[in-house]
Amino acid sequence: MDGAIQVMSDVNKYTEKEKNLIKACQDNDRKAQFEFYQLYSVKILGICYRFAGDQDTANDLLQEAFIRIFKYLHRYRFEGSLEGWLKKITVRTSIDFLKKHHSMAFVDTETMNEPEVPSVLSEQYDTELIMNEIALLPTGFRTILNLYAIEGYSYTEIAEMLNIKEVSVRSQYMRAKQKLAASLKDKHHIYYATKVL
């Protein structure tokens, strides 16, 4: 009974237009699929870019993600957030794509000293600057950093996705943060480097 109530409330959170659009996409209506693409492609491209590290690969990932989304949309039952469902498919697509086309080997880094804390923390937090530096990380580090710090997956979930041990995920996440901090420090963004660690 409680499950039925939950499903009802999830369905009711969609407008009639949204429900009709999703149902039309489930029926392979090309016009509806184009509208759906227009509605969600920017957000999905953002996720793809974080994993890809460059615009061309991100565009390839976007296409792969939408192929899967339309392939599996008939399984969507209006339970939970549609954006959460789209994000999950996009993340999985990104990981599968990177495993297939890029080395997911993790690069060992030297032990790095912690960056010095500046006496005056006057810089403003700059998301674009940080994201650009993350995009330059090796694929393995970038993937784990995105999955844990940005997408919010647990170490256990990441280990399952990447078929590696949880302890490896933890150590690679720490190394990714160290590498990111070192890169920021090298470019004289010491304030950001201290925030990363």
Image (cartoon, rainbow, N blue to C red):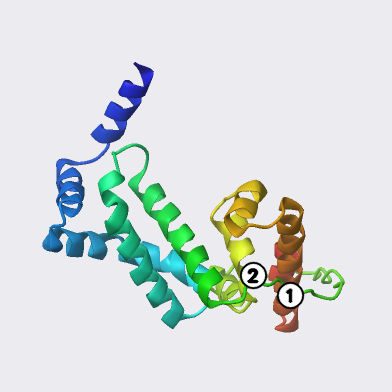
In the picture of the structure, the residue carrying the numbered disc 1 is 107
Q: Are marks 1 and 2 in contact (CB under 8 Å)?
A: yes
Vertical comparison of 188 with 118: above or below: below
- State which quadrant residue 129 falls in: bottom right
Q: Is residue 121 visible?
A: no
Q: Residue at x 81, y 69 (%)?
A: 119
Q: Could you tell me residue 74's position as x and y percent?
A: 25, 47
Give whichever of discs 1 and 2 has the lower sequence position. 1
Disc 2 is placed on an element classified as: helix
Q: Could you tell me residue 2's position as x and y percent?
A: 37, 18
Residue type at the position of mark 1: Val
- Mark 1 vs mark 2, CA separation in Å: 8 Å
In the picture of the structure, the residue carrying the numbered disc 2 is 140
- State which quadrant residue 31 falls in: bottom left
Along the line of sight, which residue is nearer the eye, 33 or 101?
101
Residue type at the position of mark 2: Gly
Q: Residue at x 43, y 75 (%)?
A: 58
Q: Residue at x 77, y 60 (%)?
A: 171
